[in-house]
Amino acid sequence: MKLKTKADNILNVIRPFAAIADAATIKLTKDSIQIKTVDAAHVCMMQADVNMANAVRESSAAYEIGDGCPDKDLHTYYVDVLRLGSALIPAKGQDVTLHIADGCLIVESETFRHRMKLKDNGNDPKLPVWDETLMGKFTVSAQTMKKAIAYMRRQKTSDHVEIRYDGCGVISYSTEEHLSDQEKKDKARSARIEFFERVPQLDTHVRASRYPTEYLYDILKVLNPTAESGHALMLVLDNDYPVGLRYARGNAQIRYLLAPRIEND
């Protein structure tokens, strides 16, 4: 495998993965690169599909893999994304070349050469497939979503937030049990953030689940606040089901899934 592109392009794709795990599975095909990982607790997982055919057409990037082989695992690698990110930071703004040889990933630019051993094994999570037409979904800007989660995290009222679809998107957190009814109403009003980008659906069934605030905060904070503040995030959810968060980053389509908190009866 040989990939030549700007270091920033690679950093932009792998940065979200480094926020939840230290290693990722990378699968190569003739026209694409797929990256997947899951956190140690198996609470969240992420997948990026990079269209390399488009990337090569639209920029000075170059990409090639070795000859085809019936062994489907020939082009599957387990990479330490934390080390890869650290190696690329000094090369920001420069062209870099990545290639694999002798069980190592080699990163080169005009000013340095870094060699890192590939991991012997790793996880290959399978993201669930569902019919999104049967689920609630809404869009929101990355900046608005980040502000909402950061605000609720600062309140320290609950370690989970509720994401709800009822014709539009709503994010809120639970109020403390010892508050009076009026105090709960007042606090709930301040904790409710609505997104009015309505997605027309014939089904008006309310869908809602609670999700850990810290996980949402960790993944949202790695979005570039200047370049991506207006970028749309698509949220897909159902009752007691993982919330799906999807967004585009250049030629990469990134999907993030977070497991809900299941209340015990």
Image (tube, grey):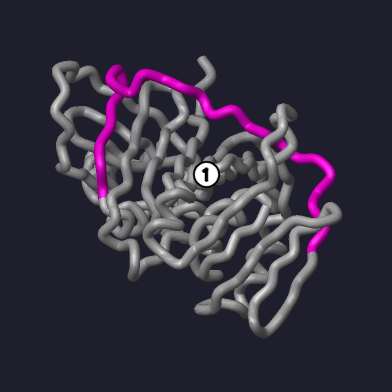
Q: Report helix, strand or loop for mark 1.
A: strand
Residue 159 appearing in the image: no
Q: What range of the chain is rendered magenta?
A: 116-140
In this rendering, position of residue 1 left or right of residue 16: right
* Location of residue 38 in the rendering, given as x and y in whole percent from the top left corner: 63, 39
Quarter of the image for residue 98 reads bottom right
The structure residue drawn at horizontal position 33% and vertical position 23%, both measured from the top left corner, is: 132
Main SS class of the magenta portion in the image: loop
**Residue 87 belongs to the span the image colors magenta:** no
Quarter of the image for residue 249 reads bottom left
Residue pointed to by mark 1: 32
* Location of residue 11 in the rendering, given as x and y in whole percent from the top left corner: 54, 64
* Location of residue 226 in the rendering, given as x and y in whole percent from the top left corner: 33, 70
Residue 38 appearing in the image: yes
Q: Residues within 10 Å of mark 1 (few under 14, many from 20)?
A: some
The structure residue drawn at horizontal position 33% and vertical position 62%, both measured from the top left corner, is: 228
Q: Amino acid at mark 1?
A: Ser
Residue 172 against residue 5 in the figure, above or below: above
Pick the front one: 32 or 84: 32
The structure residue drawn at horizontal position 70% and vertical position 49%, both measured from the top left corner, is: 23
Total tally of numbered discs in the picture? 1
Residue 108 against residue 128 in the figure, above or below: below
Pick the front one: 261 or 98: 98
The structure residue drawn at horizontal position 67% and vertical position 34%, both measured from the top left corner, is: 124
Which residue occupies the extreme front position in the image? 67
